[in-house]
Image (cartoon, grey):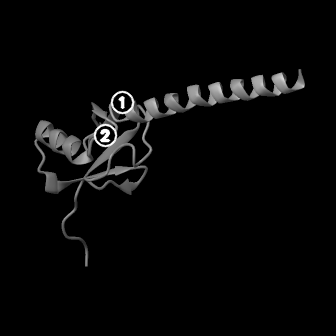
Amino acid sequence: MDSKTKEEDFKVETIQEIKEVPKREKRKKNSNKEQITLKVADPRGGETLFRIRKNTKFSKLFSVYCKRKGYRMESIKFTFDGVLIDQEQTPVELDMENGDIIEAHLRQIGGLL
């Protein structure tokens, strides 16, 4: 009976492993389609909400934002947690969550000597 018990335990563990692995793989495949809601804080004090896929490059969001607000892309920089966002980055790369705020800043040209 001991050999049957050990054999049954092995089968149970094997079945559990098989069930867990596909769930993890399925989440990874679906994560490409997951959406996130982000806020862009305007230099004038307003906020604009965007819902994008987590793997969408920020260049798309920045372009739409600037068109809606009437800004030239070159005149605005975007930051998250005080760090400049590269247009080629995605929300996944920055580990963003729903409701996170991206700050839009007017670029300053020149300065004091």
Q: Amino acid at mark 1?
A: Glu
Which residue is under mark 2? 41
Horizontal side of residue 27 vs 87, given as left or right: right
Q: Residue at x 41, y 48 (%)?
A: 94
Which image quadrant for residue 108?
Answer: bottom left
Q: Residue at x 28, y 33 (%)?
A: 52
Which residue is under mark 1? 34
Which structural element holds mark 1? loop
Horizontal side of residue 108 vs 33, given as left or right: left
Q: Is residue 100 above or below residue 103?
A: above
Category of crowding for the residue at label 1, using alpha-carbon neighbours closer than 10 angstroms: few (below 14), some (14–19), many (at least 20): few
Horizontal side of residue 12 vs 102, given as left or right: right
The x and y percentages for residue 48 are 26, 32
Q: Amino acid at mark 2?
A: Ala
Give whichever of 95, 64 is nearer the camera. Answer: 95
Give whichever of 33, 74 is nearer the camera. Answer: 33
The image quadrant where one finds the C terminus is bottom left
Q: Is residue 13 above or below residue 56?
A: above
The x and y percentages for residue 82 are 41, 54
